[in-house]
Amino acid sequence: MSTRPTYEGFLVFVRGVVGVPDTVVAEGYATLESCFNSALELIPKRIGLECLPIIYTNTVYNAAASLMLRYATDSNTSTYFADMRKTLGLNTPMYGLMNAAADQGTSGSMVISDALSNLSLADLMMMQDPYGRAVVAVLMEMGTLWGYTP
């Protein structure tokens, strides 16, 4: 694996790690390249993450995979991405985390860390799939510079 993210490396990641069949994603698939370029823009630079080249590269690839699962379209002969969105529940709205519920006779609550209670809608969307969760986990480790912790 390259220690810097490349489109070719992402294509290997998509096929080998994510498990998307070759027949679903051709090399010239514009959405795939768009997701990769978007991930390069989304993952912050100059906060130290790029000093960890393997973690940085995997974070970019995971972010791109999360975007791909959410936005890629299927061909006429395949329903791969629609099926994955249904399996992962990506079309189910997620508005935040609830820490307490009560009615007249019962109640319950749990402690949610400040970092989780401060997640944005984009963060919550990424939390819906395993690749996005890996991204959020790494970015949370970056601390207050990224904004994931209070």
Image (cartoon, rainbow, N blue to C red):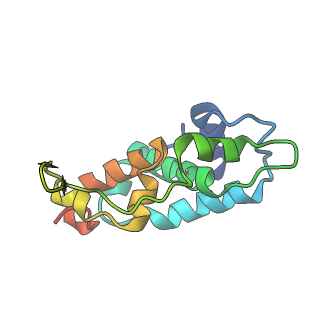
Find residue 118 and report its horizontal and vertical position in percent.
25, 65
The residue under the point 76% across, 43% down is 79
Is residue 74 shown left or right of residue 48? right
Is residue 115 shown left or right of residue 30? left
The residue under the point 67% across, 41% down is 83
Is residue 115 shown left or right of residue 45? left
- Identify whether 36 is placed above or below 146: above
The residue under the point 87% across, 42% down is 77
Looking at the rendering, which quadrant does residue 30 occupy? Answer: bottom right
The residue under the point 48% across, 45% down is 129
Q: Nearer the viewer, residue 42 or 131?
A: 131
- Identify whether 38 is placed above or below 140: below
Looking at the rendering, which quadrant does residue 23 occupy? Answer: top right
Residue at the front extreme, as displayed: 104
Q: Nearer the viewer, residue 20 or 54?
A: 20
- Identify whether 19 is placed above or below 139: above
Is residue 59 shown left or right of residue 75? left
For the question of whether residue 4 can be seen, the reply is no
Look at the image and tell me in which quarter the N terminus lies: top right
Q: Nearer the viewer, residue 36 or 18?
A: 18
Find residue 69 and report its horizontal and vertical position in percent.
60, 49
Find residue 26 and report its horizontal and vertical position in percent.
80, 45
Look at the image and tell me in which quarter the C terminus lies: bottom left
For the question of whether residue 58 can be seen, the reply is yes
